Structures are given as structure tokens and as C-alpha cells.
Image: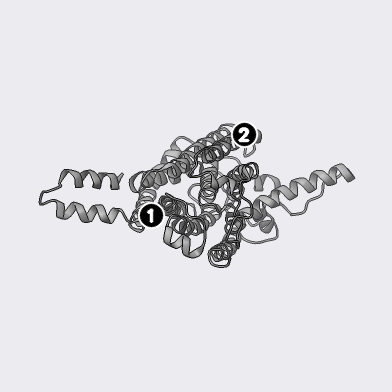
Amino acid sequence: MLYYLSQFLLDQTEGTEWTALTVPLHRLLGYISVRCAGAAITALALSWWLGPGVIAWLKRLKFGQDYDDEATQTGGLGARILSKRGTPTMGGILIVLALDLAALLWTLWNPLVILTMLSVVVLCGLGFYDDYLKITRQSGRGGTKARVKLWVQFVLAAFIGYYLWRLPETRSLVTDIMVPFQKYPVATGATGLGLLITVFTIVGSSNAVNLTDGLDGLAIGCTLIVSFVFLVLTYVAGNARFSEYLQIPFVRGAGELTVICAAMIGAGLGFLWFNCHPAQVFMGDTGSLALGGALGIMAVLVHQPFVLVIAGGIFVAEAMSVLLQTSWFKYTRMRHGVGQRLFLMAPLHHHFEKKGWYESQVVVRFYILSILCAVIALSTLKIR
């Protein structure tokens, strides 16, 4: 919006003494780096400014977690010194609001930006509905049925995949399969496989971040680290010179996704201010589904869905721990009559709590591992 406003002012002041001010302003706002900085600072400032009010509003509406969370219900974790009962949830509203406003102000809107922001809003709405049902039923397991959530996510992801395939300029994002450490696509014209990868990247990322959201600051901190990776990837993919030098696919318009990544980082840092241990607010599914979906969509839009698997290694580990735990328990119960567990508890962060790690230890150590995954993901830009 600010860029378009500067263009309007430039047109209105053409030939006047004000041109000396409007021309530099218009040129300045044309730089992605400037708009990234503006989006990050705007989102951070909005989060800090709106945070106390949003938290107070959620408390007034009694949108708080007045039930024991799943980990406490099923395990009675001794490492949990502070109860999480009464802490307001749905804090993802704050993240999405700051992200949307910053993106509205600083991005140049194109189909890639619109797809990403549309998905954020849809998944935020889905998460809000799920959180609302949990609160009204006062049960951590009383939210939206899993199949309903999956159907909405699959329909959204399929729509994105189909939309990209229909447009000639973005069709290769679906039909050409890129893998890390390879310069060229390992398959071309693979429409069916590409659509499957697109759908599972978006759905998987959304749910993986959701499963990671179980400790104070864990999900948002890891999301910040992965967002920084995609800040770099989107900038490189949207810059013809850099993409040619690094021999990665150039995607016209992808540079504007860099501004969204910057806004996510700013909004995430602002939310972490209130979500660090002991948390004043939880993001809930309202935030985790939206942020995970945004990461998955941007990975697809810059032709790097498998790099997300590396960068989001913590998210992958958390999701896999749940899948393995559930599958093994069902298999052993069917085979031996008694279900057995691979982990003390799933998702994985609760397994380490059960082993005696303090919540802050789990969070910081997962941050360290997430940074390591991010470094490996960024190395795929050069090691090919």
C-alpha cells in the first residue's frame, strides 16, 4: 500500500517543487530490502502495542485454558512446576493481525502474495474454530474433528496446487520436481506427483507446526528460525541475478514473499515477548495452523518444498514422533493385545519432559537443533 501511495503522490506532484521529495521516496520504497525492514519493524511494533490489549480481551471473553493440557492429563509431568490452567489461548490472532497489517502496508500485491495471505486467513479461521470448541467444551481433545480439519486443509492445498498448475507462468512450480543439492529438476512434466507434493507440503507443514506447539515459546521460536531461512530463499528466488548465479529456479514475483517472511519474523518476535516461559498467552491452533501453512505455501512457491523438510527438521521430528507412536501402538495392540509405546510420550518434546528435562531446557535445546537444521538448509543454495 505504501508503495502505491508513493506512486500516487509522485503522479500528483509531477512538475512541482514536491517532486524532489516524492521521487526519492518512491525509489526507496521500490527496494525489497527497505520494505522488508519496514514490514518487520511494523509487525513487531504492532505486536508489542496490541499484545497487552489482545491478552486482556481474551481474558475478558474467558478464552482461556481452564483445563489441564494433554500432557498434564495423560502424564502428570513432574517437570511442570507452573500450571498452564487459566492462560488465554487464541493468541495466534495477534500474530496474524500484525502479519496481515504489515503485509498490507509493505508488499506489492501479486498472485503469490495473495495465495499466501489467503491461506493464512483461512487456516487462522480453521484454527480459531478449533480453539473455540476446545474452550467451550473445556477439553483439550474436544476441538474440531481431525477429519474435518484435514479436509479443509486438503481442499485449500489442492486449490493452490490447481491454481498454480492452471497458470502457464507458475505451472512449472507444480510439474517440475526440485530436490535439495541438485541443480536441475529430477523430473519434469510430473503433474500428478507435483500436485501430491504440493498438497502434502502445505498440509504437513501446517499440522507439524501445530503438533510442535506444546511448550512455552517452542513453536514460535522454531517458526522464526525457519522463517529466516525462507527470507533468504524467497529473496534469492525472486532475484534473477542471484538465482542465475546460484543456479536455482527464478520465480517472478517471489521477492514479495520476502516481505511476508520479514513480517512473520517481526510478528513472531513480538508474540514471543508474551509467549516466553512462563507464557502470558498461547498461540493455539489459531496461530500454529496459519504459520505452518504459510511456510508450506512459500516453500512451494519458490520451488523448494523439500528444503522445508530440512529447515523444519524439528517440526518433522515432532510430527513423525506422533505418527510412529500411534502406528506402533496400534500395531502392537493388534499383534499382542497390548499396545506398546516407542516414546515415553508424543509429541517428542513431551518425551524429553518425561525424561526429566525442564521445559526451558527442551525449548532452548530444540532451538539449537532448529538453527543447525536452518544452516544445513541454507547450504543447499551453494552445495549442488
Marking on residue 151: 2
Q: Position of residue 206 (x, y in %)?
A: 57, 45
Q: Position of residue 196 (x, y in %)?
A: 64, 43
Marking on residue 383: none
78 relative to 129, above or below: below
Relative to residue 330, is residue 293 drawn left or right?
A: left
Residue at image location 67% in from the left, 54% down from the top: 348
Q: Residues within 10 Å of mark 1 (few under 14, many from 20)?
A: many
Of the 4 image quadrants, the one containing the N terminus is top left
Q: Position of residue 171 (x, y in %)?
A: 53, 43
Tell me, yes or no, if residue 361 can be seen here: no
Q: Residues within 10 Å of mark 2 (few under 14, many from 20)?
A: few
Relative to residue 291, is residue 369 drawn left or right?
A: right
Viewer-closest of 64 and 99: 99
- Label 1 belongs to which residue? 40
Relative to residue 304, is residue 325 drawn left or right?
A: right
Cα distance in 3D space between marks 2 and 1: 33 Å
Tell me, yes or no, if residue 24 can be seen here: yes
Relative to residue 129, is residue 190 drawn left or right?
A: right
